Image (cartoon, helix red, strand yellow):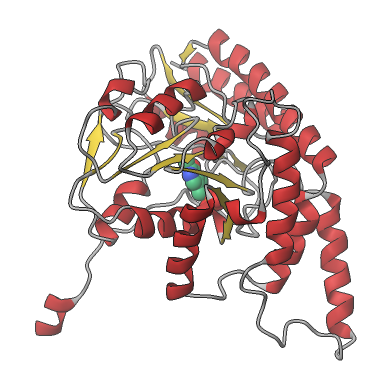
């Protein structure tokens, strides 16, 4: 058929399954706890407002700048990343409204960033084992790319990103699906060495024990730091992500976003996310609980003969010394325990196990013990 010659043909990203019914779901790195109670309160308030009819907000288009959310994020992240820093580290001013961009999950933010900043004939660089959406966006937007192999034990090779002609760089920290975390000093060297391209640091998992590169945005105009509300803020279902960069970078990002779709963020999403982000106590408690459970799980997995690089994310990427990953994956599934497995070179013997509640992880360990005892 001739029209098919003119179709943009792409192979879409494959997300982890969302099984219906009650299963132990450790396959998509969601938070096992409910979000801040402020979320439910806000949803209730929004419902009251709609019931009132006259004050309905849903009949109107939302604020396309998501001003309330951007202000709330600016305030909370300024406090977190700039207050209290050494005076020479702290820029003349902390984070401002013009340093922040928000979107429908960090996937939306990253897709916009790819479209905006990776607009060159030179290849964009990212690791060979990394978030598998990067090559999908590159294909979709016709961006040339070149993957850089991780070391044998899944580390980022700094030198692969230095002195190489490129049209941009994107690296997650911690990396996904490996969970391996690198020091911000390495990212600073990469940013510094590439003044002619934008370096995107995808910090989807940084809240679980890593140090953010966010302060770098005040020192370098070519770094964009991306974070998400889907993991540490337990709001994967609301779809909220954010990017931080110098004013100029954020302005370019907004120009592209507003040339694509102005009203991506709904009024309820903006309001609920604003209420959630201000609840820093809840955020700290949630993160502490996930970290504690992760450390317990590491010990138990080691006792069972699993091997893994240390993880600073809300998941562990592990292989068993004796039994293959696909066999363990299938047997866990038969017990309604879902983890993630990729049939891809270098990682096909690994399972990515998200951190659930203490009860989830006890069930997992019990199931793994049964499976391994049978072999
Ligand atoms: N970056 C990485 C490294 C991820 O693993 C994910 C989660 N799939 C995302 C970005 C996107 O998350 P979200 O769109 O929910 O913010």
Q: Nearer the viewer, residue 65 or 94?
A: 94
Can residue 320 be seen from the camera position used here?
Answer: yes
Q: In which quadrant is the C terminus drawn?
A: top left
Quadrant (top left, top right, bottom left, bottom right) of the N terminus: bottom left
Given residues 10 and 118, the one toward you in this image is 118
User: Residue 193: x, y in percent?
Assistant: 33, 29
**Closer to the camera in the image, 120 or 171:** 120
Given the current orientation, which residue lies at the most extreme bottom position? Answer: 54
Q: Going by the picture, which residue comes out furthest to the left?
A: 2
**Image x and y of residue 303, in percent:** 57, 8
For the question of whether residue 328 can be seen, the reply is no
Q: Is residue 366 above or below residue 269?
A: above
Q: Position of residue 110 (x, y in %)?
A: 45, 53
Spot occupied by residue 75 in the image (x, y as percentages of width and height): 75, 48
In depth, the one of 2 and 188 nearer the eye is 188
Residue 111 position (above or below residue 165): below
Q: Residue at x 87, y 84 (%)?
A: 51
Total labels drawn: 0
**Image quadrant assignment for residue 55:** bottom right
311 versus 282 height, above or below: above
Q: Residue at x 64, y 29 (%)?
A: 208
- Give left or right: position of 334 versus 160: right
Q: Is residue 362 above or below residue 245?
A: above
Quarter of the rendering containing residue 52: bottom right
């Amino acid at each position: 058929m001739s029209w098919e010659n003119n179709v943009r043909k792409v192979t879409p990203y494959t997300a982890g399954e969302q099984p219906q019914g009650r299963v132990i779901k450790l396959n998509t790195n969601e938070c096992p706890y409910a979000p801040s109670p402020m979320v439910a309160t806000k949803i209730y308030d929004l419902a009251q407002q709609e019931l009132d009819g006259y004050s309905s907000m849903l009949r109107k288009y939302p604020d396309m700048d998501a001003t309330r959310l951007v202000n709330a994020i600016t305030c909370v992240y300024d406090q977190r990343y700039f207050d209290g820093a050494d005076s020479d580290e702290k820029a003349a001013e902390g984070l401002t409204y013009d340093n922040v961009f928000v979107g429908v999950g960090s996937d939306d933010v990253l897709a916009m960033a790819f479209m905006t900043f990776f607009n060159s004939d030179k290849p964009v660089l990212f690791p060979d084992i990394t978030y598998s959406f990067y090559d999908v966006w590159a294909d979709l937007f016709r961006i040339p790319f070149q993957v850089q192999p991780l070391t044998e034990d899944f580390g980022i090779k700094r030198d692969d990103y230095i002195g190489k002609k490129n049209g941009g760089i994107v690296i997650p920290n911690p990396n996904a699906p490996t969970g391996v975390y690198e020091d911000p000093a390495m990212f600073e060297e990469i940013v510094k060495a590439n003044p002619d391209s934008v370096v995107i640091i995808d910090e989807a998992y940084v809240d679980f024990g890593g140090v953010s590169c966010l302060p770098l945005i005040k020192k370098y105009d070519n770094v964009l730091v991306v974070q998400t509300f889907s993991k540490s803020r337990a709001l994967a279902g609301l779809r909220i992500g954010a990017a931080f960069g110098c004013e100029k970078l954020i302005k370019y990002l907004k120009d592209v976003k507003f040339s694509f779709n102005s009203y991506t963020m709904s009024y309820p999403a903006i309001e609920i996310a604003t209420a959630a982000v201000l609840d820093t106590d809840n955020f700290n408690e949630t993160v502490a609980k996930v970290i504690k459970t992760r450390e317990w799980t590491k010990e138990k997995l080691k006792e069972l003969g699993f091997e893994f690089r240390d993880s600073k994310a809300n998941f562990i990427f592990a292989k068993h010394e004796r039994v293959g990953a696909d066999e363990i994956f299938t047997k866990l599934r038969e017990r309604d325990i879902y983890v993630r497995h990729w049939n891809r070179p270098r990682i096909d013997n690994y399972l990515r196990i998200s951190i659930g509640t203490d009860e989830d992880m006890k069930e997992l360990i019990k199931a793994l013990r049964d499976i391994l005892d049978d072999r």
